[in-house]
């Protein structure tokens, strides 16, 4: 199955202005040179099942009916491929978070995918600077791996082996002159990798901590969300402060019928939250 890039078609959060649609890149985007500036020997273009993790938000809209108001957030929205929290009312320099890699419960009925990451841009812009991990299901077999992405370049595998239950930390930091530093660490296995990449024209208009159902099927739809159970995020920070201090948008992932694909908890201490899987499609 070929995964193509997903571009936001509409961004209409409760206090967010509309965004202009942009087309998805073609299949040729799967083939690209490895960035020369990587500082790790693990820089390999991801071809895991033909799927690349990461990408911009798709169909971010305000809920059709009001959701329960929660303290520490400015707006609540839904998306067909993102859930989590996104700060989107400023210009941002850094984002970071820690999570425990969830165990995939694989039914064996189909291949399924779930990504967990931090990033700058992508909520209402056409660039993304992001790094994170995946819990995927190859039929009945779960797999785990790390990656970074400088959209519109392909995702690159990143770091050593990852297992369910490992404590992962990740960050993306803007260093000026269009340069971004991506860092991913597995605190359980005691490894850390970092790379500096260039993303020209990045607006840095959002900073987010996200659970994602990767995109796309051959027909352009969102891929099935792997059953990750519950994933717990902590120390979610934007520009060195709790993400809750940035009045973020809380995002819930939904299917095409509007049913929740996961649930996202409120923030505690302004920087901790969890997401719980509900359905694949």
Image: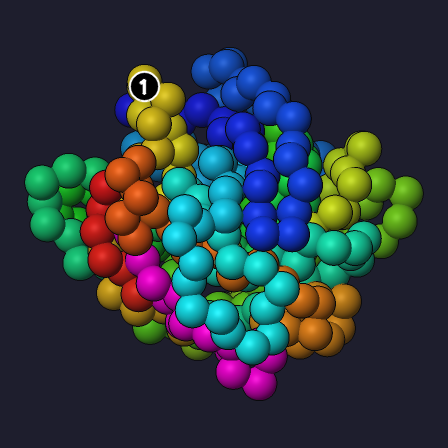
For the point 30% across and 36% down, the residue is: 256
Q: Is residue 280 left or right of residue 79?
A: left
| Up/down of 265 relative to 44, above or below | below
Tell me how many marks there are. 1
Label 1 Cα crowd, 10 Å radius (few <14 / some 14-19 / many 20+): few
Give how far across and how far down residue 110 sits, in percent. Answer: 15, 38
* Residue indicated by mark 1: 218
| Residue 14 makes an appearance in the image | yes
For residue 245, above or below residue 210: below
Q: Which residues are magenta?
A: 261-275
Is disc 1 placed on a helix, strand or loop?
loop
Quadrant housing residue 248: bottom right
- Taking depth in this image into account, of 25 and 260 the one nearest to the observer is 260
Q: Nearer the viewer, residue 53 or 159?
A: 53
Residue 33, how many percent across, how many down?
A: 62, 25
Where does the C terminus fall, quadrant-wise? top left
Residue 9 locus on image (x, y percent): 54, 28
Residue 124 is a magenta residue: no
Q: Residue furthest right?
A: 177
Q: What kind of secondary structure does the magenta stretch mostly adopt?
A: loop
> At 34% across and 47% down in the image, what residue appears?
254
Q: Residue furthest front?
A: 65
| 52, above or below 15, in the image | above
**Residue 273 lies in the magenta-colored region:** yes
Q: Position of residue 29 (x, y in %)?
A: 53, 20
């Amino acid at each position: 199955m070929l995964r193509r890039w997903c571009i936001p078609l509409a961004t209409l959060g409760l206090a967010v202005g509309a965004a202009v649609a942009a087309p998805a890149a073609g299949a040729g985007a799967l083939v690209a040179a490895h960035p020369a500036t990587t500082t790790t020997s693990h820089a390999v273009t991801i071809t895991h099942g033909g799927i690349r993790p990461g990408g911009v938000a798709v169909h971010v809209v305000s809920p059709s009916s009001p959701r329960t108001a929660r303290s520490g957030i400015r707006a609540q929205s839904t998306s067909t491929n993102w859930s989590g929290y996104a700060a989107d009312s400023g210009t941002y320099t850094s984002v970071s978070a820690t999570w425990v890699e969830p165990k995939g419960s694989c039914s064996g009925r189909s291949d399924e995918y779930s990504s967990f990451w931090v990033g700058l841009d992508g909520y209402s812009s056409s660039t993304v600077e992001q790094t994170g991990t995946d819990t995927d299901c190859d039929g009945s077999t779960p797999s785990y791996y790390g990656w970074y992405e400088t959209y519109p370049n392909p995702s690159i595998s990143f770091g050593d082996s990852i297992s369910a239950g490992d404590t992962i930390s990740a960050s993306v930091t803007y260093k000026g002159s269009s340069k971004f530093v991506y860092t991913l660490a597995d605190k359980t296995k005691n490894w850390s990798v970092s790379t500096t990449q260039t993303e020209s024209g990045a607006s840095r208009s959002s900073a987010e901590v996200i659970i994602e159902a990767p995109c796309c099927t051959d027909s352009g739809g969102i891929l099935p969300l792997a059953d990750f159970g519950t994933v717990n995020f902590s120390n979610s920070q934007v520009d060195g402060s709790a993400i809750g201090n940035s009045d973020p948008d809380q995002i819930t992932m939904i299917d095409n019928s509007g049913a929740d694909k996961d649930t996202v908890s409120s923030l505690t201490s302004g920087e901790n939250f969890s997401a719980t899987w509900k359905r694949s499609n």
